[in-house]
Amino acid sequence: MVSLEPLMRQNFIEYASYVIMDRAIPDLRDGCKPVQRRILHTLSKVNDGKFHKVANIIGETMKLHPHGDASIGDALVVLANKKYFIERQGNFGNTITGHRSAAARYIECRLTPLALDTMFNKALTTFEPSYDGRNQEPVCLPAKLPVILLLGTEGIAVGMATKILPHNFVELLRAQISILRNKPFQIYPDFPSGGVMDVSEYNDGLGKVKVRAKVRATDDKTVVISQIAYQTTTESLIASIENAAQKNKIKVTGIQDYTTDRVEIEVKLTRGVYADEAIPQMFAYTDCEVSLSSNIVVIQDQAPKSVTVSDTLRFLTKQLVAQIQAELEHELGQLHDKHHWLTLERIFIENRVYKKIETAKTAEAVFKAVWAGMHEFELLFVRPMADEDVERLLKIQIRRISAYDINKSRKDEKDVLRAINEAEKKLARINHTTIKYLEGLIEKYGKDYPRQTQIATFESVDKKAVARQNIRMSYDPETGFYGSQVKGTKHVVTISEYDRVLIVASDGSYRVIGPADKLLVGRVIYCKLFNPEKGEEFTVVYRDKTRQCYAKRVHILKFIKEREYYLIKNKEGRIDLLSQAADPGIAHLSYAPAPRQRVKGATFDLGKLELTSPSARGSRLAPKAVAKLKVLPRDRK
């Protein structure tokens, strides 16, 4: 029999690796998942300055992405709504209200100037064959921005997930400048939806932040929400308020949504409820406050890795320096090539080297004539001449030779030399050059990306403290039921959803319960609000089924909610006294009648009882069965 385990194991590993590397987790270098990289590459390839139908971009991207048009379209809309790299035209949905975008055939897009300036350089991009081998796609975009922290992203792979919160454009670039200057820096998230954020637990991207909507009271009875928390929408926020109102956690009479391009939700409060009371309840029970965890998992060196925000920024800053250096070296190489060619061209025309080919009869003779003629001026060369240079000289048209301007040629050479000198200076001070580049980006684009989320420190609202005590619990002695749905007048307690009630029945059973609709509890002798932190102390006197009398002092503290416990050993008997007094008094016991009985009773000082467990039997008060029991104050004994 053939085992399937090796096949399943191998296929699972391949599937998991594919999902991690090629679907869900972004690459640290350009901050893109494969679908995002393919969309941006497609937009750069078709870029002509005009808007393109999103449907056309999806179709072109499908040549590179094997997972269908829906995933491409959704990823493009999400990327466009972040507003950094894709300019929108048409209805791309509304991230504030949660409305979806129009169909791909109705909307258009193109690359933003920021994307064109910072995300592409064909000469420095490594390409690989697409999934079907018909096209080439970039292994990684030569991004000069910390894209992974700028955009933020979420992804769920096999056995791992990533959640990276978005950060502010200007603050990221300033942090990179601080890194280049060896200065300390701090960087915190910034959300497009605004709000107020507490970053005390962010822990460099390994913790969480708490984000609140901006809520203010316009008067005692009206609360207005002007900004919402990240990853919530006006629809989800209103739904959370309505849900809390249905559960009586907050009291509202109406909610009006006046949101357009800016959030404006008006909440009207009921009679007897005021804004200063309602606002903490909204933070506690609705999406006006959310907690967002950060878990930065990225692809680095062809493997998933968990990193911090500062480590990510340092890596990307080092990469930026290398990227700018590579661009300068590439530019310098092109400038040297241009200087070399301008020099050869000037020598070829100015010294009439082309005249030497007039007597040559064959192509080989022509080649040798030019080669020999040019080498007479070898000392003027920028670098040794190659065969390709001769071929290029021979392709110069007569019209260009006749219209050749020596002065312009010399000016062009000086301009090239000046550009070479500038490039070499920049390379020699590459850190300074990188700082200047970042400062230029801030000056050019910084005004378009101000901080949206206000940073503040605030305490989480204690739900127990702001909970409304509006649940009326009562007891019906005729039926023995207790709860919020019981119409009784005994043992009435008004509680909140977080409060607890201690109920003790005459048979010695007791339980700690929360709000309950209807619960059978028997004959209740004690029912009050219970403090789980302090508990309750009682002096208990009871008789078991043989009428033996026992007493004990107990402290009810530990419990499981709604579980039934017993104060009477063996669970059969009845309680004669349940007292919380510090000095319960003296117990007077009357024995059950018996033949030849001389002693008919006894007394016991209940103040001498030691504290014991609620489940313990307690101290036996008399050696005989007890018919009657009275407890009198000490001064009446």
Image (cartoon, rainbow, N blue to C red):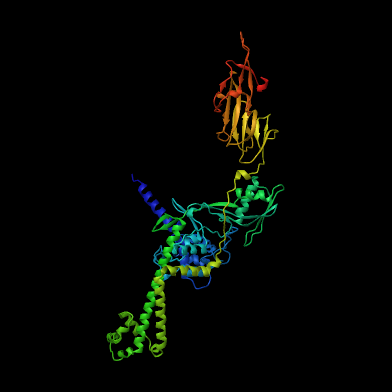
Q: Nearer the viewer, residue 372 or 76?
A: 372
Q: Quadrant of the N terminus?
A: top left
Using the image as rendered, state which of residue 192 and residue 519 is in the foreground: 192
Residue 270 location (% of width, % of height): 70, 49
Residue 224 percent location from the top left of the image = 66, 55
Residue 188 position (above or below residue 352)? above
Q: Which quadrant of the view contains residue 505? A: top right
Residue 232 x/y as whole percent = 58, 55
Q: Is residue 57 left or right of residue 264?
A: left
In the image, 61 versus 192, the foreground residue is: 192
Q: Is residue 524 left or right of residue 336?
A: right
Q: Residue furthest right?
A: 271
Residue 341, image quadrant? bottom left
**Image vertical order of residue 136 relative to residue 578, above or below:** below
Q: Nearer the viewer, residue 85 or 552?
A: 552
Q: How many marks?
A: 0
- The structure residue drawn at horizontal position 67% and vertical position 51%, both measured from the top left corner, is 275
Residue 161, image x, y percentages: 46, 53
Quadrant for the C terminus in the image: top right
Q: Is residue 4 visible?
A: no
Above or below, 411 against 259 in this view is below
